[in-house]
Amino acid sequence: MSPGPISRVLAVAVTVVAVAVALLPAAPASAGPDLDKARVQAAALRVEVDRISAEVEAAAEDYGAADQELNDVVTRLTLANEAVDSSQSAADAQVAATDAAAAQLYMSGGPGAIYGSVLDGHDISDVLDRIASVDSVVRGQIAQTTSAQATAARAKVTAADVALLTARVAVLQDRRRAAVLRAQTLQAQASAALASVDQLVRDLVERDRLAAQAAAEAAAVAAYGGSLPWGAVTVPADSYAAVDRAIAEAAADPATPWAVGALSDARHWLGTPYSAGGGGTAGPSTGWCSSSAPDNGRLADGSCAATSTLGFDCSSLMLRIFSAAGRALPRTSREQWTIGIHVALADLRPGDLLFWAYDTANPASIHHVAVYLGHGLMVQAPHTGGHVEVAAVYLSGLIGAVRPV
């Protein structure tokens, strides 16, 4: 899930600020702190905000991963249950057939009686025919018994698989529930802190964050310098035309077998709402609201948008478009960082994946992913309240690019 550029989500980041405020001494109720004290408090607060934001965003990604695995396990469990029923029915039928054959054999006096009847043959040819017939009966009985035993054994193995899958479902449900409870606790802390925090501190945090974001962007531009494959970027008014150009360029010189298919499917979803935790290989779906991260599925007024919004978050959009192209991706942006070769920005091609992190030295802090279109443009699912869009690639927090293989 993704907050996109920090400057674009300040309006919905107040809850994160409040969580950090709860960990700091509250300002006196009678009067605001003096400016110097407010600046010190705001600086400490901003550091704490960044730490908490990374942690809760990672928790939200973990929730998405657990949810995806849960869906997969439930599907496998359904199939395994069907296999148990089928195997058991087949085993029961074969046991019944074996029992019937044994009953017939018993009624005839058993194998000894059958072989004894061979001696009643009138000539050697008749005796040989009877021997062949008796041998066939006994072999058939043995084969039926063996087959029934094998089928029953398979049913037992499948039943064991069902038990393991059922246990895994319980684990994943507990993991999701724990994530929700943890996030709800943070939200309660945030709500309590908002009532007492001084506005001056909040204003300073927001101002410092804007300044830090602008400085980081400028530093990133200077660091990449001439290695960037684009100059000044203007987002075109016609998003579809921008994607069509990328599709044409990928078709003429594809970086991967999936580039054209992924970009073509991305074109289809332009304008689809963002839904935190929503979306998958089948398309848009509703998400969830249980995190204090900037993209927690809630609007600025605190109302939950994700649970009533059919859409994608950043990583589920990538999951969908590459699935449509024939390449399976893992669910979260952190996992998607590991599925290809890492390419320099100077070597970017349409269909490559771009990643952002809270700490560009630590891939574990990755929180956002988008697909590159070329010419400094990308398609992304940006944040709650936003829609799948064509946007300019921003450098602040950009940890690198991956070409799926």
Image (cartoon, rainbow, N blue to C red):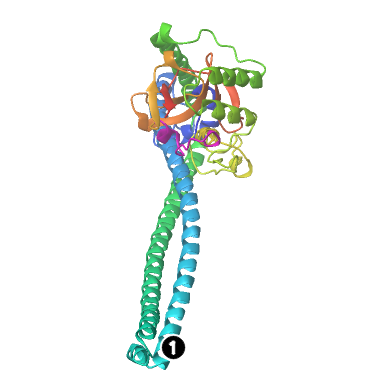
Q: Is 274 drawn above or below residue 116 in the view shown?
A: above
Q: Is 106 drawn above or below residue 186 in the view shown?
A: below
The spot of residue 132 in percent (x, y) is: 37, 79
Give the image quarter of residue 392: top right
**Crowding near pointer 1: few (<14 within 10 Å), some, many (20+)?**
few
The verdict on residue 227 being magenta is: no
The spot of residue 261 in percent (x, y) is: 56, 29
Q: Nearer the viewer, residue 226 or 92?
A: 92
**Residues shaded magenta:** 323-337
Q: Is 217 drawn above or below residue 1 in the view shown?
A: above
The reply to whether residue 380 is in sight is no
Q: Nearer the viewer, residue 372 or 250?
A: 250
Residue drawn 62% across and 34% down?
A: 273
The verdict on residue 336 being magenta is: yes
The spot of residue 48 in percent (x, y) is: 39, 30
Amino acid identity at mark 1? Gln
Furthest toward the top, the residue is 226
Q: Is 90 drawn above or below residue 202 in the view shown?
A: below
Number of numbered discs overlaid on the protein picture: 1
Residue drawn 33% across and 24% down?
A: 361
Residue 348 placement, left or right of 321: left
Determine which residue is flagged by label 1: 104
Give the image quarter of residue 147: bottom left
Q: Nearer the viewer, residue 158 or 48?
A: 158
The reply to whether residue 143 is in sight is yes
Q: Secondary structure at mark 1?
A: helix
Quadrant containing the C terminus in the rendered view: top left
